[in-house]
Image (tube, rainbow, N blue to C red):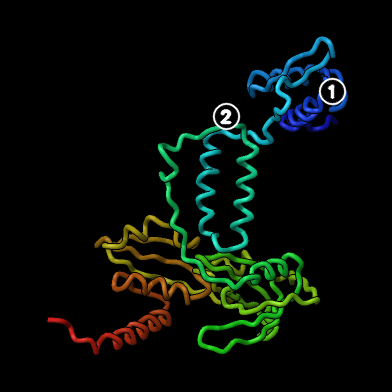
Amino acid sequence: MPKYKPQHSRLLFIDRELARGRYPNCSQLAGDYEVSAKTIQRDLDYMRYQLDAPIEYSAKHRGYYYTEPNYQLPAISVKESDLFAIYLAEKLLTQYEGTPLYDSLRSVFRKIEESLPAKTTVDLGNDHARFTVFPPSNTLIRPGIWEKVAEAIRLSRRIRVVYRTPGAEPAVRDLDPYHGVRFEGDWYVVGHCHRRNDIRTFSLARMESVVLLSTDFRIPATFDFSRLSGSHFGVHWSDNEYQVKIRFDREVAGYIRERRWHPTQQIDENLDGSVVLSLTVNHLLELKRWVLSWGNMAKVLAPPDFVEDIHECTVEMNKLYNSIKPSI
């Protein structure tokens, strides 16, 4: 069965041989790469006439060479649309600014740029200010925390964390970090908490210190992050499932229609222009905050316990403002 030898790999091989200055001919290149001499000849023609490679044949040396000594075939071949995507992707990196990933990813982009032909350009208008990315607000992670947690996930090593839960004193926890999650400007780690003997989610921004322990762990076969987080709304999840229905007034119905808020969502239209958003979630904390962000334009219809929770919250909010006298 013949070996699969894609053309781009052959081109890089030919480029390397030409750069050595040994004047290889078609027969030598074909023998070394185990293809026909006609295939090599077609590759040389493609490099010369399609890629503008400065290749000439030397009758004296009976082989090919680069007329420009420092020429090198670009390691990757991209279209203008690809370059434009790279340009936009680099702008999207701003959402990771302040994390160790930012410098690493910027380094990757620099290497991509350096591997492109010098004559490659993309017309972005008069300047690079035609597109803007507003990154989400980022939580502040103490120096060294992200690196240690990432290493523990990679090596499957237990960590000892001093963790600060809002409204409580910092506490020491031993964690087996299974999975890292980036969500709305914060980094989280999902893993087994030995203090609670349960799988929990922890924010890296709330970690005051992290120590990498010598104890290894194995992720249980029963742990499936995609199943665990499949019906989440936000970064929190549980083993429960809630069938939620929320009515949105006509004034904001357009915003609800135009976005995919959840994989399970269903939108039903009402005659008055309002809509009912139905979805199945396994945790209500962040869904509650989201519903309240719509003010009096959203009303929870189900389940009853969630309706009652929202009602109690609005009653307490109302008490905060009852003491304020309206200005005349």
What residue appears at the point 81 percent right and 24 percent down from the top-left corner? 21
- Disc 1 target residue: 22
Disc 2 marks which amino acid? Answer: Lys
Q: CA distance from mark 2 to mark 1?
A: 27 Å
- Disc 2 target residue: 119
Q: Residues within 10 Å of mark 1 (few under 14, many from 20)?
A: few
Give the vertical position of 53 relative to 263 (above or below). Answer: above
Disc 1 marks which amino acid? Answer: Arg
Q: Which circle's residue, 2 or 1, is located before the other in the chain?
A: 1
Q: Which mark is residue 185?
A: none
Q: Secondary structure beneath disc 1?
A: loop
Where residue 107 sits: x, y (%)? 63, 50
Where residue 35 sits: x, y (%)? 83, 24
Q: Secondary structure beneath disc 2?
A: loop
Give the vertical position of 121 relative to 59 (above or below). Answer: below
What residue appears at the point 66 percent right and 36 percent down from the top-left corner? 76
Residues 168 and 297: in front is 168
- From the viewer's perspective, tell me whether residue 186 is left or right of residue 175: left
What residue appears at the point 67 percent right and 83 percent down from the top-left corner? 173
State the image quarter where residue 26 is shown: top right
- From the viewer's perspective, tell me whether residue 39 is left or right of residue 178: right
Residue located farthest toward the front when viewing the structure as drawn: 69
- From the viewer's perspective, tell me whether residue 14 is left or right of residue 205: right
Where residue 304 sits: x, y (%)? 40, 80
Give the vertical position of 29 relative to 216 (above or below). Answer: above
Where residue 29 sits: x, y (%)? 83, 23
What residue appears at the point 63 percent right and 21 percent down from the top-left corner? 50
